[in-house]
Image: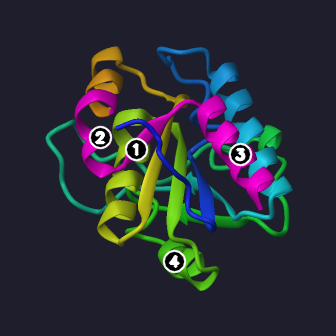
Amino acid sequence: MPLTTLDPNTALIVIDLQKGIVSGNFIHPIGEIIDRTRTLIDVFRARNLPVALVNVAGRAPGRTEQGPRSSTAFSEGWTELLPQLDQRPSDIVVTKRSWGAFATTDLERQLKAQGVTQVVVTGVVTSGGVEATARQAYEQGFNVTLATDAMTDIRAEANEYSIRNVFPRLGETASTEGIISLLERRSSAL
């Protein structure tokens, strides 16, 4: 469903835009994803809306069929958020150890303490951290919006499946421009 509205207290959640991940082989140019996300960050900050920056520093402890468990030791700087995000003291910063940003962090508590009722999710990868975070946000009662041009994946079919089949069941989708336009219209109406 296209984006219809944004709640008065909507937060932006940025998933896994960190040094160790952005060198991956993504289907969209990562620079464009970072630029669109940064544009959203700037707009949210200008309107004093919460910005949550999420990085990943491990995995859930369960076994999987996809090979041996990788070491939890990361190369130096791997978990560092990208400098382009211009992390601020007012940002909510959480480190997750699972696909989604809610399961292994206190993100829900921090957002609800600020009265947040809706989240806009961006980042990498669409079918992994972004989708898992959107699912968890929906399950925690947040209205969810997904900025589909501010996310990417390593597999085109996974990216497309999430956008076409999963996201419409979790919330609304929009472009970065559409989200900003709605925020601007709402601000001018106040």
Q: Position of residue 43 (x, y in %)?
A: 78, 47
Span colored in magenta: 163-190
Query: Does residue 97 appear to the left or right of 159 in the view shown?
Result: right
- Which residue occupies 70% across, 21% down? 31
Decide: marks 1, 4 in contact (CB < 8 A)?
no
Q: How many badges with numbers are in the image? A: 4
- Tag 2: amino acid: Pro
- Which residue occupies 57% across, 35% down? 21
- Tag 3: amino acid: Arg
Which residue is under mark 2? Answer: 168
- Which residue occupies 63% across, 49% down? 79
Q: Residues within 10 Å of mark 3 (few under 14, many from 20)?
A: few
The mark nearer the N terminus, 4 or 2, is: 4
Q: Is residue 81 at least partly visible in the picture? A: no
Which residue is under mark 3? Answer: 185
Q: Which mark is residue 172?
A: 1
Q: Which mark is residue 106?
A: 4
Marks 1 and 2, how far apart at CA: 6 Å
